[in-house]
Amino acid sequence: MDTPAPTPGPAPLPRFPADFLWGVSTSAHQIEGAVGEREASVWDAFTAREGVVRDGSTAEVACDHVRRYREDVGLLAGLGVGAYRFSVSWPRVNSPGGIGFYDRLVDELCAAGVRPVATLFHWDLPAGLDWLERDTAERFAAYVEVVAERLGDRVERWITLNEPAEHTLFGHALGVHAPGRALLFDALPVAHHQLLAHGLAVRALRAAGAARTGITNSHGPTWLASDDPADTEAAAFHDLLLNRLFAEPVLLGEYPDGMGELMPGSASQVAADLAVISEPLDFYGINYYAPTRVGAPLNTPSEFGGIPLPAELPFSVREITGRPVTDSGWPVVPEALTELLCGFRERYGDRLPPVVVTENGCAYDGLEDTERIAYLDAHIRALHAASAAGVDVRGYFVWTLLDNFEWAEGYTRRFGLVHVDRTTRRRTPKASYHWFREALREQRRPPAP
Ligand code: IFM
């Protein structure tokens, strides 16, 4: 497959500060492969079930990154990103010699002048563990200690968890992701134990003298279906679940709207846990994809990004019309990123640490991916608008480097700047890769006198 010629993008992007961190993100389970060389994870067990992944695929080989990581670091260096956000697989670290892979990866990144940003948990829990158990949080902290000890001298930033809300909601409340439990509101202990794991991990990282530490949550504005009080109430509930439940314990040291009473343990235990969970952070990671339009329940199942939602939920998701949609069916609404960031700044004021957008991207097919260029261009401008409005934004990471295993969607959604052939795993940079490289080059150019 031939690399397309660079496609001219729209007008030059606005300038960001010289120390702004530009990067791309990936996650272990979605790209690594080499599953036989590590312990099993909940995702291995889940994808072995019939009918849970759209194309029936697994991540057994994925992008074969464990074997091709040098080539992938070459792609990052060629792109000219300052940083690379990857995740460390807990099951791999548990396996003999497993951490050596990350040691080599981090060395390769440093040698290429790309700063490593490590996420410690991106959904691939060791198969024997369970977030319903409190003990998993303590085990997580012990694993984090091992990783920090080995990589702490070179990792630039640490992210404890990736999107605990989605892991709770999709994996434990709705059952469409691993471990495949559909517990609805009985999944709340999973939220609390992940948050506790986050706080314990921050303490373990600091004790190990590690560099800057944060968490990554996925957020997006909740838009009202109408001004009707029933819709307003339903939207507030959606906002609570997606935007507040995982942010406020971390930023404010409290659960929103009395949710603390629903968490496992006595009131004094939950209060003590919140003191751990709210350890001050160096940055707050936000993944943004799209807003959600929400109304009162309709008594019929609705959908969220292609995921069926049960009718028992106290809200329903409505279509956002008049917008282009990506191959995932998500509406393209760049200005909602400005709205989100300004809204967070307004809601949390000085309790909000500097923000890093740790994921933003879209699924489109093809090497001449002009839609992706338009998407990224518009979102980077929206980010700049938030920064101009006073939000302290320090970095932006594109999701993602390589077309990869998109969880329950298998390989049917291509989010990469680089195309990966499903049979040969050959990498081919797309037009968006060339566009992003030029945009980064422009950012590095000294400003005109
Ligand atoms: O692929 C995922 C990633 O693992 C977490 N954030 C959203 C991405 C796109 O769905």
Image (tube, rainbow, N blue to C red):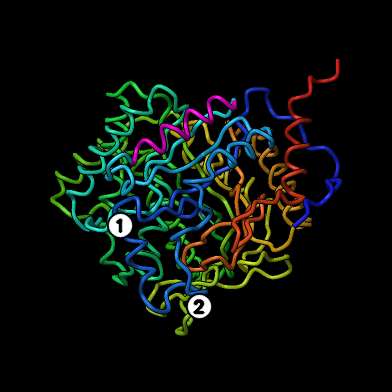
Q: Which amino acid type corresponds to the residue marked 1 in the rendered image?
A: Ala
Badge 1 density bin: few <14, some 14–19, many ≥20, Cα 10 Å: many
Q: Judging from the image, what secondary structure is the residue with disc 2 in?
A: strand
For residue 70, side relative to residue 42 (left or right): right
Classify residue 189 by image quadrant: bottom left
Q: CA distance from mark 2 to mark 1?
A: 33 Å
Label 2 crowd bin: few (<14), some (14–19), many (20+), radius 10 Å = some
Q: Which mark is residue 302?
A: 2
Residue beneath the point at 42% across and 33% down: 158
Measuring from the top left, give residue 200's x and y in whole percent.
26, 37
| Mark 2 or 1, nearer chain start | 1
Seen from the viewer's position, the closer of residues 74 and 380 is 74
User: Which residue is rendered at x = 20% and y = 42% of the image?
Assistant: 138
Read off the residue under disc 1.
Answer: 40
Q: Is residue 394 left or right of residue 132?
A: right
Q: Which residues are magenta?
A: 98-112
Q: Is residue 100 magenta?
A: yes
Name the residue rendered at 30%, 46% in the picture: 195
Above or below residue 50? Residue 347 is: above
